[in-house]
Amino acid sequence: MQTAETSPGPLHWWTSATPHARKALIAGGAGWMLDGMDVMLYALALTTIKDDFKLTAAQSGLIASATLLASAFGGVAFGIIADRIGRVRALSISILLYSICTALCATAHNLEMLIFWRLLVGIGMGGEWAAGSVLIAETWDPKQRGRAIGVMQSGWAIGYILAALLAGAIIPTLGWRWLFVVGAAPALVVFWIRHSVPEPDAWLRSSGARVGLGETFSILSRPPYRARVATACLLTTSLMFAFWGLFTWIPGFLAMPPEKGGAGLEFVKSTGWIVTIQIGAFFGYFTFGFLAERFGRRAVFTIFTVGAAIFTPIFGLSAGNKWLLFAVGPIIGYFGHGFFSVFGALLAELFPARVRATAQGLCYNFGRGVSAIAPTVIGALSVNLGLGTALAFLGLLFLAGAVIFLFLPNTQGEKLE
């Protein structure tokens, strides 16, 4: 029996991992954190850009939708690329793409130019997750894979918080263009990744069995992978539509006047509200993997998605009560983000190494592609319903995700080959 002296400490999962696994997590986590920062810069500058370019709510949502649609393409494309040239190389290219193009958004002087640069940002954004999540899944021990992916996902919340702090400091003084210039910073991380992070053994072992693109999709169209692809795509579609519809518009909801269904907070104060939401998101991402290892992935995923389904309407309909908004914000952040920590491990476990990144990129980004219309739909609905009411309806999609998840096989803890 273990004594207090011999029991593993709270960081045993990290200290017992191989150096390669730790480097992979740092690379994927940093890339995802900075990805989150660059992507959310637009959401945080949304109200200012809308006024500057004289955009309608639907047009503002269209820019976010274009980014998401491009991210779906980027996720599928970089999944294929990662299966061909390696996880680390694909990760590096994707980070360079989204960081440089975020900075170039500062040069936009009309809607068309801004959409163009955000399309390229989206391609890099989708590619980072497709390459980074597989890199981590293939280098970590199956017993600790879930928590490693959860730690990676928590980087998104940190990136969002960084974006909120930067927006609060830069937009009121220098304007939104300088905010995007800061988005070039993630490119510096690539130099360390390329020189310090090795390719995972699982990918190196699969080099002799690597197949062409046609054969890849032929494999995925056969049982049991065909059903897994279909169910996973349906799952990601439901949850991502709800997620992007909600979190793209939360900054605008907090800053929008009450007569338009918003909370009526001034920009700096709404930034403080956003930070509290993302603190909740950080703990949601971070704890999901630990809880799933302790209580089982299915049970924890159900709790998170049902929690999001309950608190989304409460949040959306609380515009008139600022203190209730403040209290519910971290809760919606916790439940509405945390379940994403399942995807990196789950999708990796469903498919073999020779097609893993392609399949993972396809399933994850099919949902992201469909969800590209979510910001536009919510923006359009807000015209007649008010933004808070439009957001409340998204709770139904979180609930649908809880049901769909039950139709996927329970692969928790399986070794990746």
Image (cartoon, rainbow, N blue to C red):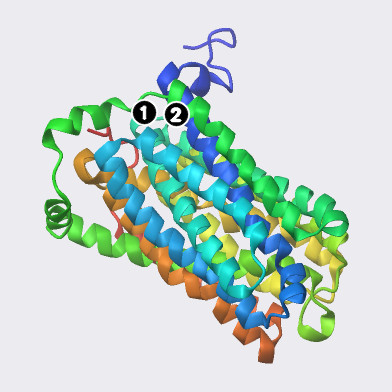
Which disc is residue 24 wearing? Answer: 2
Q: Earlier in the sequence, mark 1 or mark 2?
A: 2
Give the residue at x 52% y 50%. Answer: 98
Give the residue at x 59% y 46%. Answer: 156
Q: Nearer the viewer, residue 81 or 399?
A: 81
Q: Is residue 170 shown above or below 392?
A: above
* Other residues around mark 1 within 10 Å, as few (<14) / some (14–19) / many (≥20): many
Give the residue at x 59% y 59%. Answer: 336
Q: Is residue 20 left or right of residue 43?
A: left
Q: Is residue 210 left or right of residue 300?
A: left
- Mark 1 vs 2: CB contact within 8 A: yes
User: For the C terminus, which image quadrant?
Assistant: top left
Q: Is residue 144 left or right of residue 393?
A: left
- In the rendered image, residue 236, in percent from the top left (x then y), is placed at 41, 62
Q: Secondary structure at mark 2?
A: helix
Q: Nearer the viewer, residue 77 or 109?
A: 109
- In the rendered image, residue 371, in percent from the top left (x then y), is placed at 47, 70
Q: Nearer the viewer, residue 309 or 364?
A: 364
Q: Quadrant of residue 208?
A: top left
Q: Is residue 340 shown above or below 93?
A: below
Cα separation, mark 1 vs mark 2, equals: 7 Å
* Mark closer to the observer (1, 2): 2
Q: Residue furthest bottom?
A: 384
Instruction: Specify the amino acid type for callout 2.
Output: Ala
Q: Secondary structure at mark 1?
A: helix
- In the rendered image, residue 296, in percent from the top left (x then y), is placed at 43, 43
Q: Which residue is mark 1?
A: 139
Instruction: Specify the amino acid type for callout 1.
Output: Thr
User: Can residue 410 be seen at all in this image of the molecule?
Assistant: no
* Other residues around mark 2 within 10 Å, as few (<14) / some (14–19) / many (≥20): many
User: Can residue 120 be seen at all in this image of the molecule?
Assistant: yes
Q: Is residue 142 left or right of residue 279?
A: left
